[in-house]
Each structure stands twice: as C-alpha cells, then as structure tokens.
Image (cartoon, rainbow, N blue to C red):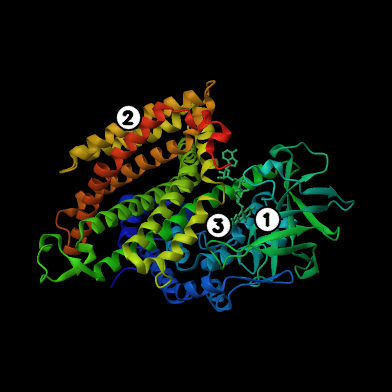
C-alpha cells in the first residue's frame, strides 16, 4: 500500500532513530507519553487526515471562500470535519496544559501536523490559529484577560488572528498607521485598515479575537512605537457570554494563486468610530510581544512547505511506479521490447532522488530544530537551555525560508514527473505547487529572512553560535569517516563545512564594511548555501545511523536503510558541488546588482 501525505517509515526513522526523541520523553513534563502512545497518536492522526480532511481538499480548493456583506463562508464541507478535529482535540495537541492544551511534546504535534497540513491546510489552520493568540494572552495578559480569552481560543470555539500588515506596511511593519486613542475607562479606540489577514473573518467560530498592532497617538515612529491590542469581534461580557458587535469588519477577501479555502481578509477598524481594543502588555511592547507568535509561526510555515513537498513527492514516486511509458534505455533500439514504468528511466530516477534527498533532509532539519526548541525550555542545565535556544534562534530564518523555497521547487518537479497529467487538476501535485508558493512570502519574505540571518543571527554571541553549528557538523563527519562506505562523502562534507565557515566570515565582515550593500545583495544566496550544507549534514547523519542498523535488518528495512546511504551519496556528490560553486560566487562578491543603473534594468 503506497504511503500517502507523509512517509511513515521515514518519519519514524527521524523521530526515534536519528533524533532519538525518546530521550525528550524523560523530561518531567512529558512523563505521560512513551514511544508506544506517541506512535498510536500518530496513527490516529493519519487515519483522520486521510479519511476526512484529504477527500475534501480538491473540492474546497475549487469552491474557495465566499464573501457576503462582511461575512465569509468557508466551504460547506469544512463544518463537519472541523467538529471532528475539535472532538479529537487535535487542534491543541502541542499546546501546554497550563494554556488548556494536551501538553504533548512538540515533536509529536509536528508528526501529526505532517498529516493534517497536506491533507487540508486551510481547514487545519482554522482549527489551530487561535493557539498563537491564546499564547500571547497567556504570556502577557492580565488575569482577567487570560480568564476571558485563553480557554475559548485554545478550544478553537473562538478563532485568533494576527493583524500586522497594511497596504503601506508590509515587510516594513514599523510604517503602520493604525492608531489607538486611550478612553477614560482604560480601553482604546482604534482606527485603521489592515490587509491580507488570514482568518480575519469566517463562519466556523463563535467569536474572533484579533491581536492588532497599532500606534498609540503620540508614540514614536517605527517599530519601537508599536503597541499590541486585543480587539474582539464580539465584546465579551464579564460572565463570558458574547456582547455587542465591535466595530471591526471584513471589507473583502483576496482572490489568490493558492490556498483558496483560506480566508485572506481586508479588515477595517473603526469605520463607525467605535472599534474598542484592550492593551496587551505595556505600551510600545507590541513588536516584542508579537515576536513570540512570529517565531512559532515561522516554524509552522517551514513545516507547511515541507509537508506539501513530502506529499507531492510521494504522489510522484507512486505515479512513476505505475505510469508505463517508453522502453528501457538498454532496449532502446528494440521496438518489440515492452514499455516500462517511468521509474526505470534514468532521468526520472534522478529527479525522484533529487526530490527525496531534499524532503528527507528537510524533515530531519525540522525535527532537529524542534528538539533544540524543546531542550531550550526543558533541559536540566541553564547552559544547555541557552545553547539550544541560541541554535534554534539562529536557524529559524533557514527553517522558514529554505523549506519554503525548496518545498515549492519540489512541488514543481512533482508536476514534471506526472508530465501532462501533472499540469491538470486530476492530481493534487498541481494544487500543492500553488498552495506552497505562499510559504516564501508570508511571515517574512525570503529577502527579509536573509537579512535577519546576515544582520542578526550569524554574528550571535560574536559568532560562537555559528561555530557551535559547524562543530556539530564536524562531529557527524568524524562518525561518518569511521563508517563503512561513507569515507569519501565524509571528506567532501568536511570540505564544505570548512568552506561555509570561511564564507560566513567573509560575508559577515563585508556586512560591517563600507561595502555592506554588496554583502546584503548576497544574503539570500548565503542563506541557501548554508541551508544546502545543513541538508548535506542531515543526510550524512542519516547515512551513519542507517549503516549501523543495516546489519541484520529485515528485507524491507534493509532497502530503506540502503536508500538512506544512496540518498546521502547522491546529494553530497551531485548537489553539494553546486553549493561549493554558490559559495565561490558569494566570496567573489560581484557588485553588478548594485551598480547597474535603475534604468539599466530595461523595460522602460
Ligand atoms: C495569503 C496571505 C496571507 C497573509 N496572512 C497575514 C496575516 O494573517 N497577518 C498579517 O499581518 N499579514 C499577513 N500577510 C501579509 C504578508 O505577511 C506580507 O504580504 C508580507 O510580509 C510581505 O509584505 P508585502 O506584501 O507588503 O510585500 P513588500 O513588503 O512590498 O515586499 C515586496 C518585495 O520586496 C522585498 N522587500 C521589501 N522590503 C525589503 C527590504 N527592506 N530589504 C529587502 N527586500 C525587501 C520583499 O522581500 C518582497 O520580495 C499575508 C499575505 C498573504 C498573501
């Protein structure tokens, strides 16, 4: 039976064999979970995703959302399955018990999301987005605010959003013009217009709680003058019941390239002069508070892209096994020879292995960061918590953007494997490619992630965090050198790691020199070169673990483990040399992109 959505064997390998997540279950907080219960939870999630969410994916993409007089209707089929998600409490599996969730370890929540997201991301997002809002209120709200909102948001009976973007304030959030004026009762009156707001309005929740970024009248320009407000769609009475409608309305929804069933709303605040919001935290702390949500959201976006890529890869690998077309190359001249499944053709095999190598490596990388994050909160020593937190923070822009961009490329290559059929709506690969594109745009575009990496992350703690990363990679190289059959790729990897260190120093120094703009013109290529090297590391690590398990493995496992060794060999011998070229280009520091006159771009 072909795997759907996510390769369960690979997921188990990463979680239990490579990342050794069983160790995390030793933490006090996760005592109720063991390997068996975790596997059972994943099995149930998979069943629900395949049986209920996936069958309505294509249909909901065709229907999209409907805007009518300030209201947004989701596809009708969503209502029943939304209830199933809530009944099973899948919407808050990884949310802490203190916040009203199930308290599962983050790797387990991610493992279940690996099924739910590609099965129907818009639907799952309606059920889970309130967790982020709840978390902000849980961390920064008054006792009264916590009591009023957190439980309802975590249960998904009320929805949550994030209102940052305005037409003139996209990447530059600090340019926002939504204003807040203090009222005599301590509340604020807000006025402004927000755009592109996910789940700003929809008909699955009784109430929607909007965290809104706005500037209190008179506060400084830029990000340092931004505050954050809780703006409920319906006011909430002291007994928890719903009160009057607040003056925040959806004025339209976007027609989009993908994620059609997700409502992307324009929101008008205070058109009747009566949009009431409540300050969360202190004035001017808005960005600091919102960043709690943004970092988690960036991980989620990376995961979203990975899961589309994984599902698209599985569909194309299965199609390649079944689609009969063309003779085997060795019988090319023999017209009487039988046609073969396209998986027999060298170019199709190359493409599949290219896709597999990235999907596998991205999955490992995602769980690596999930483990770092858990350890940053739960590890026994302060030193370890700090080290893991730093690693997580440094690599967040890469998990966000590298997975987004590579995930999209994989979906596009999946279309290629299907040939003409891939370009039709007969198979989901076409939808996955469209849906995946958003991941390199929202939660900070590629360019913004690259600037974050170069300007803030590489130099963290005077470069010590980056050096720790290289040291971790070299540990894997050392193990690979001692592993049968991996010696030559270990040496290639070692060269790449050393080169990455040189290039980071080069671009980091340039970024602090008068030629800093040249450095920033190479920031995104640097992010990709670093991402590639991380991919190679993850695959080499996999190959080391797989080799240890090969001896005496059952037939099916042996094929899986041998597949891991070949995947690492493929990536390190065919993709990593391209990365070495990318690193040369970064060192060369060509300034043409800056020197070309604006009119020289042509088209005038
Ligand atoms: C489907 C969808 C859902 C969304 N959901 C939400 C949501 O729930 N809440 C919310 O607040 N927002 C949301 N957004 C908005 C999203 O976060 C922004 O679109 C995104 O941050 C980019 O802003 P922008 O569209 O204004 O592009 P711009 O900021 O105009 O950027 C255009 C291009 O210029 C580049 N660029 C801009 N500034 C710089 C710079 N300083 N240096 C280098 N390059 C730069 C960008 O990388 C990009 O390629 C959503 C958007 C979409 C499409």
359 or 254, which is in the foreground?
A: 254
**Residue 403, relative to residue 156: is it above or below?**
above
From the Cβ of disc 1, is ligand 1 less than 8 Å away?
Answer: yes
Separation (CA) of disc 1 from disc 3: 31 Å
Instruction: Give the labeled residue for mark 2.
Output: 498
The answer to which of marks 1 and 2 sits earlier in the sequence is 1
Q: Quadrant of the C terminus?
A: top right
Q: Secondary structure at mark 3?
A: loop
- What residue is pinned by disc 3? 96
Q: Characterize the local packing of mark 2: few (<14), some (14-19) or many (20 or more) Cα atoms within 10 angstroms.
A: few
Secondary-structure class at tag 1: strand
- Residue drawn at point x = 76 percent, y = 70 percent: 241
Mark 3 burial class by Cα count in 10 Å: few <14, some 14-19, many 20+ = some
Label 2 CB sits under 8 Å from any ligand 1 atom: no
Query: Which mark, residue 538?
Result: none
263 left or right of 481 in image: right
Query: Mark 2 vs mark 3: which is more N-terminal?
Result: 3
Tag 1 residue: 195
Please name whichever residue, 458 or 260, is drawn nearer the observer in this view of the structure: 260
């Amino acid at each position: 039976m072909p795997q759907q959505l996510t390769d369960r064997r690979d997921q188990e390998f990463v979680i239990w064999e490579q990342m050794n997540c069983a160790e995390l279950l030793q933490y006090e907080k996760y005592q109720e979970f063991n390997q068996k219960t975790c596997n059972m939870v994943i099995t149930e999630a998979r069943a629900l995703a395949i049986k209920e969410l996936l069958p309505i994916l294509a249909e909901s993409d065709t229907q999209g959302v409907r805007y009518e007089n300030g209201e947004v209707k989701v596809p009708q089929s969503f209502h029943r399955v939304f209830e199933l998600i809530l009944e099973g409490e899948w919407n808050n599996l990884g949310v802490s018990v203190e916040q009203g969730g199930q308290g599962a370890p983050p790797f387990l929540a991610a493992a279940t999301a690996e099924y739910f997201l590609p099965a129907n991301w818009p639907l799952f997002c309606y059920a889970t987005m309130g967790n982020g809002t709840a978390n902000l209120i849980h961390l920064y709200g008054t006792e009264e605010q916590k009591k009023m909102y957190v439980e309802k948001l975590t249960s998904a009976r009320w929805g949550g959003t994030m209102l940052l973007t305005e037409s003139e304030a996209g990447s530059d959030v600090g340019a926002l013009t939504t204003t807040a004026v203090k009222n005599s009762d301590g509340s604020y009156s807000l006025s402004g217009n927000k755009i592109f707001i996910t789940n700003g309005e929809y008909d699955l929740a009784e109430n929607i709680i909007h965290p809104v970024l706005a500037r209190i009248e008179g506060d400084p320009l830029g990000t340092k003058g931004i505050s954050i407000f809780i703006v409920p769609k319906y006011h909430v009475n002291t007994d928890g019941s719903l009160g009057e409608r607040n003056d925040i309305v959806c004025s339209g929804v976007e027609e989009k390239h993908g994620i059609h069933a997700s409502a992307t709303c324009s929101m008008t605040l205070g058109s009747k002069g009566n949009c009431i919001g409540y300050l969360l935290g202190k004035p001017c702390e808005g960005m600091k508070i919102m960043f709690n949500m943004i970092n988690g959201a960036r991980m989620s976006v990376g995961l979203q892209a990975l899961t589309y890529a994984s599902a698209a890869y599985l569909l194309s690998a299965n199609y390649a096994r079944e689609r009969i077309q063309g003779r085997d190359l060795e019988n090319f001249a023999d017209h009487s020879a039988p046609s073969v499944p396209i998986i027999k053709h060298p170019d199709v095999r190359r493409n599949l292995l290219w896709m597999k190598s990235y999907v596998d490596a991205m999955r490992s990388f995602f769980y690596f960061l999930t483990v770092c994050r858990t350890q940053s909160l739960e590890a026994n020593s302060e030193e370890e918590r700090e080290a893991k937190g730093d690693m997580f923070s440094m690599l967040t822009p890469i998990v966000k953007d590298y997975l987004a961009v590579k995930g999209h490329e994989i979906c596009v290559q999946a279309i290629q494997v299907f040939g003409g059929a891939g370009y039709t709506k007969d198979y989901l690969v076409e939808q996955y490619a469209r849906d995946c594109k958003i991941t390199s745009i929202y939660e900070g575009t590629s360019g913004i992630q690259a600037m974050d990496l170069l300007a803030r992350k590489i130099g963290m703690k005077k470069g010590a965090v980056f050096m720790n990363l290289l040291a971790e990679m070299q540990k894997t190289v050392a193990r690979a050198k001692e592993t049968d059959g991996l010696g030559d790729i270990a040496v290639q990897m070692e060269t790449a790691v050393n080169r990455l260190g040189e290039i980071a120093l080069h671009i980091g120094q340039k970024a602090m020199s008068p030629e800093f703009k040249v450095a920033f013109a190479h920031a995104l290529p640097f992010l990709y070169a670093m991402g590639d090297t991380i991919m190679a590391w993850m695959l080499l690590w996999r190959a080391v673990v797989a080799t240890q398990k090969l001896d005496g493995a059952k037939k099916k496992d042996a094929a899986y483990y041998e597949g891991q060794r070949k995947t690492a060999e493929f990536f390190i011998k065919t993709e990593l040399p391209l990365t070495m070229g990318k690193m040369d280009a970064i060192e060369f520091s060509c300034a043409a992109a800056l020197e070309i006159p604006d009119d020289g771009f042509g088209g005038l």
